[in-house]
Image (tube, rainbow, N blue to C red):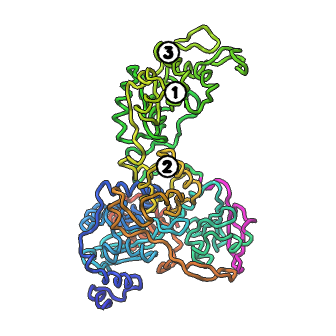
């Protein structure tokens, strides 16, 4: 039945991967007849946020590959780990043609949605695959010729798929090599992003300078392998899963003697490899200046710069975390209020970003050129708070500084005074503070002189206003002086863009963004009630960024135990509205495991991913372009003008490639 189906579609001698795919598709043929699953714009943006680090890492390699593919009337596609296309670029004419079969961003090309196709089948088989014309299970897709290769993390997990597609009759033979090389380069780039505490061990069989495309790479931390690429597994003749979390000594016993220059090192089985070891300058390069494939959305943090900790130092608005879009209107009204000398009272649970909002107020108000002075009324000892606020003269009390102190209220002159947790201020100081706010003068301890002050006033509390006024230890007249304009800051769980915000915050806390949330892990974070709000979230994200290897996928088991225990979602559930569209998408496939033998004869668990049809050729993208130009020159009998027209290149480009290939004019 199967062979009849493939043969009737015009396919002779189907390879094993295509054959297995058709078998799977025939079992679910009824579900494949439905319309393609296509995310709406908001759902696609959520996916783009989730995979932003992969998009950024892949950008320069996709740009190079798409330049070559476009000349052959092809396009380059990047999908996520579930088969949803995130990005498409290349030949404009074929992009329009591909749109007719929904081969565009936002469409799911998982195999159980679109039948046998390069993206979906590569995900299931965890291997490079080519699907030409009639090999596609659905007749509508047989106008395509597609080549796809998985992009793997340093831990061997599939992060996404790189695909080059074109017309079934025109895509050249080298397309498969092109997509495999580009996918490997993206994976190798993720290895390069390892943190400072990671050593990088690279090796190859040839006695020559290390070839970054072909060499094996191991990431080493505390003498344990924490990451590797496919080339390392191939050279050591073991599955990648067998390398992970194993001591380096099991594979290269003398690795500690290596240096930055290649030298011979022997495997446990006696095989000679030429290897280098790098400890410094690993993964600390600045972020790529290549144009990103996806920009951070509104509401994402604009910079890694944290608010200045120096007392009174103003922070420009662009250096602050961007406010939730719903608070922008509140900020504008609050700015008008503080510019009119009205007192601002910020209300909200602990960790909702009251100081961040206060700093935004300072940066946007007429007080922006003056200092920002923050005082946590709950943190200062009661015996010191009066001296801290009002200052003191020399010798005013035992232990006073010899030169005295101006006090925080005078330091705030010309800027903004932020009184955090004002509900916890000692009662006896409230009357003195009220006088300062009413008369705008400060009298230091031990002095009979009053100093005039002018500042914008912002106060904050995690208590509700009615509770604050009912408390006997808080003066009502002070409350009415500080609450001219009330601002209620929403809790983190109330953010409409929570999914997007969490992904953006993760990137902000990584030195070089490379981590990606698994769908289920992100669902759990979005469903958690976050009693500590932004402060608690940032603590969780900083911990993930510190402990997970670069390029890792964040699974539910990577999250703190208390989040899993208190989340209303089981690991596999997905009920968050922002993620509802993802429930129909297949989960990301990870590398299968089984068993085998190490080089020293000991056993290991883990079976290799399904291998590619052929070993990756030892050529570069430039070599592929040169090969294509030579073929066109041969067809055109050496005519440069005809060759350039056929390839869609300028004649100078052809001459330049020929000059590189034959620098002496031979």
Is residue 134 on the magenta stretch?
no
Nearer-N-terminus badge (2/3): 3
In three-dimensional space, the C-alpha distance between marks 2 and 3, rounded to whole angstroms, equals 39 Å
Direction from residue 521 to residue 135 in the image, left or right: left
Nearer-N-terminus badge (3/1): 1
Q: Secondary structure at mark 1?
A: strand
Nearer-N-terminus badge (2/1): 1
Q: Residue furthest top?
A: 448
The quadrant holding residue 484 is top left
Direction from residue 343 to residue 222 in the image, left or right: right
Q: Nearer the viewer, mark 2 or mark 3?
A: 3
In three-dimensional space, the C-alpha distance between marks 3 and 1, rounded to whole angstroms, equals 21 Å
For mark 3, what is the residue?
A: 435
Above-or-below relation of 539 to 159: above
Q: Quadrant of the N terminus?
A: bottom left
Q: Position of residue 604 (x, y in %)?
A: 62, 79
Is residue 270 on the magenta stretch?
yes
For mark 2, what is the residue?
A: 537
Q: Nearer the viewer, mark 3 or mark 1?
A: 3
The quadrant holding residue 490 is top left
The residue shown at (65%, 56%) is 197
Q: Secondary structure at mark 3?
A: helix
Above-or-below relation of 402 to 449: below
Query: What range is drawn magenta here?
Result: 255-283
Q: Nearer the viewer, mark 2 or mark 1?
A: 2
In three-dimensional space, the C-alpha distance between marks 2 and 1, rounded to whole angstroms, equals 25 Å
């Amino acid at each position: 039945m199967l062979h009849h189906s493939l043969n009737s579609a015009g396919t002779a001698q189907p390879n094993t991967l295509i054959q297995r795919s058709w078998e799977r598709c025939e079992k679910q043929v009824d579900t494949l007849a439905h319309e393609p699953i296509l995310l709406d714009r908001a759902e696609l943006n959520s996916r783009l946020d989730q995979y932003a680090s992969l998009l950024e890492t892949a950008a320069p390699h996709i740009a190079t590959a798409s330049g070559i593919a476009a000349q052959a009337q092809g396009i380059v596609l990047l999908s996520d780990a579930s088969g949803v296309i995130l990005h498409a670029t290349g030949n404009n004419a074929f992009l329009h043609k591909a749109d007719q079969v929904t081969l565009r961003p936002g469409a799911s090309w998982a195999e159980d949605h679109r039948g046998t196709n390069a993206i979906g089948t590569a995900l299931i088989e965890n291997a490079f695959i080519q699907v030409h014309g009639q090999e596609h299970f659905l007749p509508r897709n047989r106008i395509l010729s597609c080549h796809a290769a998985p992009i793997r993390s340093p831990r061997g997990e599939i992060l996404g798929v790189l695909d080059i597609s074109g017309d079934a009759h025109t895509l050249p033979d080298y397309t498969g090599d092109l997509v495999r090389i580009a996918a490997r380069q993206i994976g190798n780039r993720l290895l390069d992003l390892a943190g400072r505490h990671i050593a990088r061990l690279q090796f190859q069989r040839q006695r020559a300078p290390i070839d970054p495309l072909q060499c094996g790479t191991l990431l080493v931390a505390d003498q344990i392998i924490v990451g590797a690429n496919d080339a390392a597994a191939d050279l050591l003749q073991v599955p990648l899963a067998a390398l992970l979390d194993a001591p380096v000594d099991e594979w290269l016993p003398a690795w500690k003697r290596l240096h930055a220059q290649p030298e011979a090192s022997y495997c446990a089985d006696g095989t000679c490899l030429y290897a280098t070891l790098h400890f410094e300058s690993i993964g600390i390069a600045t972020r790529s200046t290549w144009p990103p494939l996806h920009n951070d959305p509104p509401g994402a943090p604009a910079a890694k710069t944290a608010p200045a900790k120096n007392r009174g130092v103003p922070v420009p608005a662009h250096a602050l975390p961007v406010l939730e879009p719903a608070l922008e209107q509140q900020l504008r009204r609050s700015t008008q209020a503080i510019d009119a000398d009205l007192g601002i009272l910020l209300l909200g649970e602990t960790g909702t970003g009251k100081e961040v909002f206060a700093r935004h107020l300072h940066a946007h108000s007429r007080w922006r050129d003056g200092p920002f002075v923050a005082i946590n009324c709950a943190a200062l000892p009661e015996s010191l708070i009066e001296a801290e606020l009002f200052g003191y003269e020399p010798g005013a009390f035992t232990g006073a500084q010899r030169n005295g102190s101006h006090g925080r209220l005078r330091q705030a002159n010309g800027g903004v005074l932020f009184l955090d947790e004002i509900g916890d201020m000692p009662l006896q100081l409230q009357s003195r503070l009220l006088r300062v706010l009413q008369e705008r003068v400060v009298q230091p301890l031990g002095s009979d002189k009053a100093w005039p002050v002018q500042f914008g006033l912002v106060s904050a509390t995690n208590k509700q206003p009615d509770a604050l006024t009912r408390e006997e230890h808080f003066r009502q007249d002070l409350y009415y002086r500080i609450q001219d304009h009330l601002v209620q800051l929403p809790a983190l769980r109330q953010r409409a863009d929570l999914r997007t915000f969490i992904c953006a915050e993760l990137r902000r806390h990584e030195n070089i963004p490379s981590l990606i949330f698994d769908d289920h892990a992100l669902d759990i974070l979005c469903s958690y009630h976050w009693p500590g709000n932004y402060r608690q979230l940032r603590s969780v994200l900083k911990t993930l960024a510190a402990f997970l290897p670069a390029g890792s996928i964040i699974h539910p088991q990577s999250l703190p135990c208390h989040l899993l225990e208190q989340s209303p979602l089981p690991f596999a559930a997905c009920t968050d509205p922002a993620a509802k569209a993802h429930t129909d998408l297949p989960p990301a496939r990870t590398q299968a495991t089984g068993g085998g033998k190490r080089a020293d004869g000991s056993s290991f668990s883990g079976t290799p991913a399904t291998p590619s049809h052929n070993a990756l050729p030892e050529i570069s993208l430039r070599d592929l372009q040169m090969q294509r130009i030579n073929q066109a020159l041969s067809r055109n009998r050496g005519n440069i003008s005809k060759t350039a027209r056929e390839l869609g290149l300028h004649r100078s480009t052809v001459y330049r490639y020929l000059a590189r290939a034959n620098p002496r004019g031979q």
